[in-house]
Amino acid sequence: MQVEDGMKTHEQFADDLALYALEELTGSERQEFEQHLDTCASCRREVQALRGDLSLLALSGAGPRPPARSKDRLMRAIAAEPRGVSAHAPALVRRRGMSWALVPTLIAMGLLIWAGTLMQKNDAMQHNLSSMSVLYKATSVQLQEAKERLQLLSAADVMQVSLSPQSAPHAPHATTIYSPSQKRLMLMASGLAPAPPGKAYELWLIPMEGAPMPAGMFKPDEKGNAMMMDHTMSEGVLAKAFAVTLEDEAGSAKPTSPILIVGSGL
Amino acid sequence: MDKSSGTVTDAGNDMRLVARVRAGDQQALAELYDRYSGVVYAVALRILQDTGAAEDLLQDVFLQLWRKPEAFDSSRGSLGPWLAVIARHRSIDRLRQRRPETDIEDCVIASATDLRDETERSLVIEKVRVVMNEMSPDQRTAMEMAFFQGLTHTEISEKTGEPLGTIKTRIRSGLQMLRTRFAS
């Protein structure tokens, strides 16, 4: 979403996505970034995707397994803080010939047990509250994302373009949905050949004037299908056409190979 | 791209265990530990360079999972990659001697990588290493300094003598390369 948050634009925040995912942003810079994330689903999705990339990077550090004692230590620790424990207070045993002198002690014990029960109930309620808060956050994010996709599909200036090979119109096929005002697009493709090692498909937005603009990288699955649910363009220019080429998988700033499929929105 | 098959299988299986953890089932946590402790420990050890500190971190991550199992958002992907990222962030926090920057429930990640099975895990690790080896030494170094040493882009720029913009580009395109190689 192309909104301005104070002095910073979406593009400036987008430039810091990797820094945020790597936990480099701190203090007010981080707060400002998180305020933007609250309103921008595309940045939120990219942060989540970047964390996915980072999890892969984490695996390059795979090494020795932890010692066996670590598991014993963990199991002892969780045994010391069990959950779902029944809050039943132990039953008081009636005894014959009970001395009245024990009454204050029994009352004190009763109060202690009652307080303990209340604390356990409080813990359980806090746990439930925490679960509901997490669920609420996740649902809010999903709702926001759905809302933004709907906005794209129902935008007044939305354009849908079908892309097919210039020479053989029945082979690979792609459809893009793009809104210049929202600067966002989606792509659905089918019938694509697997990308060679080190290569990926790149979508290009061909503006009314000027050079093609990169509009996202994608690779097909084993059935030749591919989908880019969201891609945010740096500029909301009017598109004359869309095209797909095969590029190095790190992406290219300009097309370096022949157009595989192309479609005009005019 | 259809990443759903891996996600559903992986998350579905893990989620059954996570649901049992939520109900207070200690055995379920033990099973998750058996499955992912290697990944968490390896990340912590690589960053902290100390077996004792890595063991503490491992304990910390799984205790967090025990205390807040609902923080894992299964709709976004697999548990293994999520734990790996939590382990990395907590290790860097410890390295920088600071309070955690991100609550675990706010650390939502999108990943379909399946690490549940030992064989699958080995294949993924091998593939990551291949991709890392395909990167130029400068790019690989920049990524490792950022990820495993917790250096900021500015610090990496100062250490390597490369412009800040170059470091940013190297890290961004390196991550993009990993993503596209694992996307298909």
Image (tube, rainbow, N blue to C red):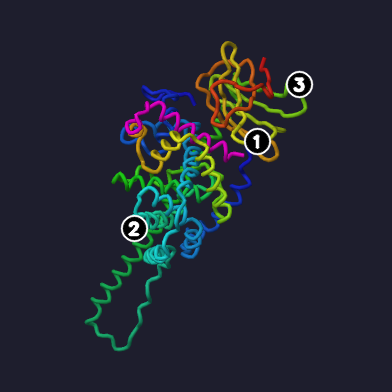
Q: Does dot 2 land on a helix, a strand or a loop?
A: helix
Q: Residues within 10 Å of mark 2 (few under 14, many from 20)?
A: few
Q: Residue at x 68, y 40 (%)?
A: A222
Distance, label 1 to label 2, CA atoms, is: 44 Å
Chain ID at mark 2? B
Image quadrant assignment for residue A207? top right
- A184 lies above or below A209: below
Q: Amino acid at mark 2?
A: Gly
Q: Does dot 3 land on a helix, a strand or a loop?
A: loop
The secondary structure that most of the magenta stretch takes on is helix
Could you say which disc has been placed on residue B52 in the image?
A: 2
Q: Residue furthest front?
A: B137
Q: Residue at x 51, y 38 (%)?
A: A49
- A66 lies above or below A204: below
**Residue A225 in picture, x, y percent from top left:** 68, 36
In this orientation, which residue lies closer to the viewer: B15 or A219?
Answer: A219
In this orientation, which residue lies closer to the viewer: A211 or A181?
Answer: A211
Q: Amino acid at mark 1?
A: Pro
Residue B82 lies left or right of residue B92; in this view the side is: right
Distance, label 1 to label 3, CA atoms, is: 21 Å
Chain ID at mark 3? A
Chain ID at mark 1? A
Q: Quadrant of the C terminus of chain B?
A: top right
Q: Residue at x 37, y 28 (%)?
A: B162
Residue A82 lies left or right of residue A189; in this view the side is: left
Of the numbered discs 1 and 3, the one sitting upstream in the chain is 3
**Residue A230 in picture, x, y percent from top left:** 56, 31
| Magenta stretch holds residue B36 | no
Residue that numbered label 1 is attached to: A220
Residue that numbered label 3 is attached to: A167
Distance, label 3 to label 2, CA atoms, is: 64 Å
Q: Are marks 1 and 3 on the same chain?
A: yes
